[in-house]
Image: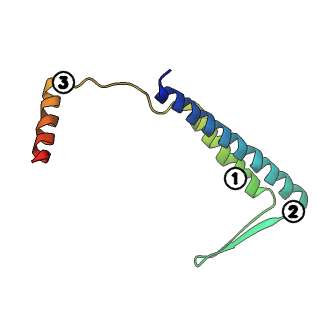
Amino acid sequence: MEPAILLRGIERLLVVGSATLTIYLGFRLFVIGATAGKSVEAKTAFGRVVVGGTAPGLVFMTWGCSVLIYALLHGGAEVGTKTLKPAETQGEYQILKGLAR
């Protein structure tokens, strides 16, 4: 098996695994917010944001779901070779020859 294909498979497993972990952590945050009624507050120069109850967990789960769906629908990069035409090879050779001077 080619190393590029093996590495691509490992990358896909890592993306799916981390998205699944994000969904699980979002669910746990959702449960904590629903039962304890906790809230998160952030103050900036532009204003104040208060997120309470179940909202942080839902945002976390939504982000994980969107990453997972995108990773499963879009295969990503393809491994392959490109055959250069003689004109392209000659142009690249001329560029490299000019840099060597």
The local crowd at label 2, few if under 14, some if 14 to 19, many if 20 or more residues have their Cα within 10 Å, is few
Q: Which mark is residue 59?
A: 1
Label 3 or label 1, whichever lies nearer to me, is 3
Q: Which residue is mark 2?
A: 37
Choose between 31 and 25: the one closer to the eye. Answer: 25
Identify the secondary structure beneath mark 3.
loop
Task: Say which amino acid is labelled 1.
Answer: Val
The residues bearing labels 3 and 2 have C-alpha atoms spaced at a distance of 66 Å
Q: Earlier in the sequence, mark 3 or mark 1?
A: 1
Identify the secondary structure beneath mark 1.
helix
Name the residue rendered at 47%, 23% in the picture. 2
Task: Say which amino acid is labelled 2.
Answer: Gly
Choose between 61 and 98: the one closer to the eye. Answer: 98
The local crowd at label 3, few if under 14, some if 14 to 19, many if 20 or more residues have their Cα within 10 Å, is few
Q: Position of residue 62 (x, y in %)?
A: 68, 47
Check if mark 3's residue and mark 1's residue have beta carbons within 8 Å.
no
Q: Which residue is mark 3?
A: 85
Task: Say which amino acid is labelled 3.
Answer: Lys
Q: Does 18 sit above or below residue 79?
A: below
